[in-house]
Image: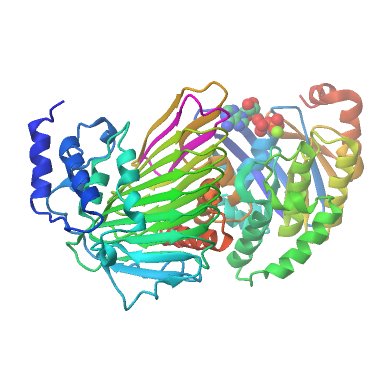
Amino acid sequence: MALPQTKVDATEARLSGMEQPQGGWTALARGQALARVREMGLPARRDEYWKYTRPDTLVSAEAPSAALFDAQETPVFGEIDRLKIVFVDGIFDAEASDDLTLEGVTIERLADVAHADIHWALDLYGTLEANGQDPVQRPLAALNTAFATDGVLIHATGKAAKPISLIYRHASETSDVILHHVIKVDAGAEVTVLENGPAAARFNKCMEIDIADGGTFHHVRAQGRDHERRAATHTFARLGRESVLKSFTLTANGVMTRNETVIELTGDDAVAHVAGASLGDGDFHHDTTVFITHDAVNCESRQVFKKVLRNGATGVFQGKILVKPDAQKTDGYQISQSLLLDGDSQFLVKPELEIYADDVACSHGSTSGAIDEEALFYLRSRGVPTGEATDLLTLAFLAEAVDEIEDEALAEEILDRIGSWLLRRRAD
Amino acid sequence: MLEIKNLHAQLEEEDKQILKGVDLTVEAGKVHAIMGPNGSGKSTLSYVLSGRDGYEVTEGSATLAGDDILDMEPEERAAAGLFLAFQYPVEIPGVGNMTFLRTAVNAQRKARGEEEMSASDFLKVIREKAKSLKIDADMLKRPVNVGFSGGEKKRNEILQMAMLEPKMCILDETDSGLDVDAMKLVAEGVNALRSEGRGFLVITHYQRLLDHIKPDVVHIMADGKIVKSGGPELALEVENNGYAGLLEEVA
Ligand SMILES: Nc1ncnc2c1ncn2[C@@H]1O[C@H](COP(=O)(O)OP(=O)(O)O)[C@@H](O)[C@H]1O
Ligand SMILES: [Mg+2]
């Protein structure tokens, strides 16, 4: 079907100013990705998949500028022994980064190795993204594959000695950044990747993760809270037999965030948990879009998303579990909940189950509610002031999501971050 | 300790008068009991005193150790020394019982300008008090009242009371839903807290709790008012003759 002319025009307007890195082993994938972008067209307001989130500022030719924000807080993950890789407005900062050597993994930068003729990531770069275009199109991810200027290529061959921490700093009010990471976890290998920071005025990030049999991948990210920053991120993962993926995202403020996670469970007994806590105070928009495909026997998937919203914030959750005909004994769970701290905020949800196997246990639920007045009074009657009591109940609301972080020290970091966000907004 | 004068209260939402002139004084060191038929306003009195939303005081006053409490926020009343053991303790998923108690103890200390209790001191004290109420470590770790049996919830109320050391304790039907053993435990917990500086107001429907917590004064409440007061023998009268006879007598 031919694209509507308006979509073609909008897409070409975006593409016109962009330059594709040339040559090397990524050239083919980039060329194909560009063709996909042209075939699909960039997201437009009337697209079904963008019903609750306006894509215009994510696809416009120019990134809307975003003021820098002095967070005045110690950066997250500060207490964690980790290997730091710093990007400032998408540009690698060697000075601020650690040496990229770590036991159990090899780490390279896309921009460093893109000129080579051959690379282990050849089979993966753009491949999981391309697979993830069906049945739902994700043109911003194809745009990313075609134009990414840098990123990291992580190959875990054993147990990584410590977490790899990607730090995204924002220094220019007009930065428009595209990064693409590829992570390959070998059979039985294990690695943890951390991400934090506002990254840019507009950030398009894609992460492709291929986990072989028995491999484990942990992912914890805290999206920076510059009020005016925008981000569209995609996480594509393919899981082999008995492999494990656990991904948690904290999103605090930021005018526009669209996080898409696309997971394919292709080996029996694989486990995928994706969770998130989202804090919006003001005219902020947080969209969590998840698509999990069960294509093997006895796999488990969990989606746990909690959003705390006030002062005009909007939370979106689109979550789908697709169970293919042979994916018997699937255990699928999905919960999305919002805590609306006032009447100005809204939570828009579209939970979906599509099941073609008969022996499965899948459940999903979604709720939206205010602070429990009974519980609040109970706490106050014990002497806990309203503000502190509200915070305690808010943390309790978020607990199921934060509990998905397996590592206690990382969970502590995230809780600290949530705690300080709440403290700044203390109502009493 | 607690002085209630001519207290009138109605529901905020509808024009329904529930407390119709309650007069009651509980002196420090004394245990007063309130008995009365269902719907007479006993729980409402406890809620109005502790500051729950939804009630409007239209007349009268209530003071705690001389301070007007009706204008205070619930947390201020708590810090001033008022404690209500709820008839229906609230479940709070996601908040650990221990965290809840420590937050409460320290919030009250802070409000009174006292030093916060250290984590280790707190642990020592709570372990000891929990033990005497047969509350195990697991109950302390679990979310507040979630999955607790009726008896566990009530014991948990008494544990909170023991930790917070209030000046004035109001117990709303703490005996309801308890078997004999659990009631004894609760009564022992209360009795252990009886002291010269502390007042108790024990609301109960039945006389049997008062076998274990011996009251100094018993009041009968009916239709939003105290209709009769007397010694412990009044509770026995209720037990033997029911409220009907008593209420006829005062009508
Ligand atoms: N929030 C409320 N909404 C409607 N009616 C109420 C409310 N609170 C109390 N009442 C009414 O007030 C009366 C007294 O109730 P309550 O104080 O619970 O009595 P008791 O504790 O003595 O059984 C009852 O008729 C009850 O239905
Ligand atoms: Mg009652």
Residue A321 counted in the magenta span: yes
Say which of A47 and A101 sits in front: A101
Say which of B166 and B143 sits in front: B143
Q: Main structural element of the magenta stretch: helix, strand or loop?
A: strand
Q: Is residue B201 above or below residue A115?
A: above
- Dividing the picture into quadrants, the one containing residue A291 is top left
Write the residue at 37% across / 69% down: A85
Q: Is residue A122 above or below residue B154?
A: below
Q: Is residue A274 above or below residue B223?
A: below
Q: Read off the magenta span.
A: A316-343
- Dividing the picture into quadrants, the one containing residue B33 is top right
Percent of width and height locating residue A390: 51, 51
Write the residue at 68% across / 36% down: B43
Q: Is residue B238 left or right of residue B12?
A: right
Say which of B189 and B20 sits in front: B189
Percent of width and height locating residue A357: 51, 23
Q: Residue furthest front?
A: A117
Write the residue at 50% across / 28% down: B14
Percent of width and height locating residue B164: 71, 58
Percent of width and height locating residue A98: 39, 75
Which quarter of the rendered image does ligand 2 occupy? top right
